[in-house]
Image: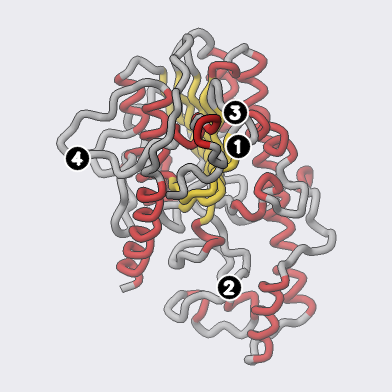
Amino acid sequence: MATLRLALAAALLLGLATCASDAPAAYEVPAKGGPRHVLIFLVDTLRADHMACYDYPRDTTPFLDDFLERGVRFDKAISQSSWTAPSVISLFTGRDVVGEAVALPAELPTLPEVFQGAGYRTGGFVLNPLIQNAENGFRRGFERFQTERAVRKAMTWIKNSKGKDTLTYVHMVTTHDPYAIDPKYHHFTGGPGLVPDEVEARWSAAAEDGLDLSDEVREEMTQARNGYDDDVRLADSQFGTLVAELERTGQLDNAVIIFCSDHGEGLWTREAFDFSPEAQGATTVEARFKMTHGGQLYDELVHTPLMIWAPGVEGGRQVSSVTSNVDILPTLLELCDLAPPSDATGALSGTSLAPAMYVDTTDTGADAGEHLAG
């Protein structure tokens, strides 16, 4: 029953995303001007609302804050699921996922396979065990697939890719628990907490119902949230390192870059559902509230960042319509002028976001962030 509820809720969200993307608008994607580097940088377990570039009041994304002046921010990106496998399946296939699939369906062409078939070099640099597992099929189409030291090895790959059409997929787990494990990167840990009033109100209500909310319990939750913010800032720095390598090697001006996530994180924002393991026999607010992800579909678990940079894009644009990671493959196909996969599994579920990126607002007078809201 829980799986059915998740699938139905996800299908509803993705249905909204598809409907929101059907809007007539004048736009033109610039012609491909030479070897192109496509970089998909996915930060596992990253909540949009803990990123300064999404108006979080902490300085968690100093690099992205500046880099967004060159790109487009999608404000309502809804992930396919609140855990990794179904979300990445939808990203890799451009298809909706029903249920809690772990492996890529063998009959579906994948994003790296499509790009490899078009003559691109394809490299995957993956730190999530589910995506690393060869039995789950996520390695299909990658010429090179690395499972350690992702940033460093991706930098070398980028350097050696100059002059060639290249797809690079980087899957970091920086913001996955446990948080802030390296003291060298502590920025907020040990300092004052930043807990929204509505979360404080939920904690207090639970305490009134008999759950323990001692100073010690509150401090553990608060410092863990601080550690998560440290990890967001670290992920921002890791992304900046790869972008800097693209710039250093002269590939940035003709690069298509996507920054995204597979799902968010609970961070003790709400109580776990009654059927969840967290809810069984809990005596403290910390134990009863949802810490991580999976099993629920609240905003903090499915509202993720989605930002795209591409040649000719008007920087600083914000798009307010609902989008999803299922839209990433069709978007890349249009930006790179590639044909959709030819197979017997039907059309892609996702919709290209190019209209949101290149819409000509001079004729319509429309707000660049509203043209997909129809």
Type of residue at label 3? Glu
Q: Which residue is mark 4?
A: 346
Q: Position of residue 198 (x, y in %)?
A: 67, 73
Q: Quadrant of the N terminus?
A: bottom left
Q: Disc 4 on helix, strand or loop?
A: loop
Type of residue at label 4? Gly
**Disc 4/disc 2 C-alpha distance (Å):** 39 Å
**Disc 1/disc 4 C-alpha distance (Å):** 33 Å
Asked whether the residues under the numbered discs 4 and 2 touch, taking CB atoms below 8 Å apart as contact, a structural biologist would say: no
For marks 1 and 2, the one nearer the N-term is 2
**Is residue 62 or residue 311 the one in the foreground?**
311
Asked whether the residues under the numbered discs 1 and 3 touch, taking CB atoms below 8 Å apart as contact, a structural biologist would say: yes
Type of residue at label 1? Arg
**Disc 3/disc 4 C-alpha distance (Å):** 33 Å
Which circle marks residue 314 in the picture?
3
Of marks 1 and 4, the one in the foreground: 1
Q: Disc 2 on helix, strand or loop?
A: loop
Of marks 3 and 2, the one in the foreground: 3
Query: Among all residues in the image, which is located at the extreme left?
Result: 344
Within-10-Å neighbours for mark 3: few <14, some 14–19, many 20+: some
Task: Using the rendered image of the protein, determine whether residue 259 is visible from the camera's viewpoint.
Answer: no
Within-10-Å neighbours for mark 1: few <14, some 14–19, many 20+: many
For marks 3 and 2, the one nearer the N-term is 2
Q: In percent of the image, x 50 and y 53: which residue is there?
A: 263
| Left or right: residue 237 compared with residue 28 | right
Q: Position of residue 323 (x, y in %)?
A: 45, 47
For marks 4 and 2, the one nearer the N-term is 2
Query: Among all residues in the image, which is located at the extreme right?
Result: 191
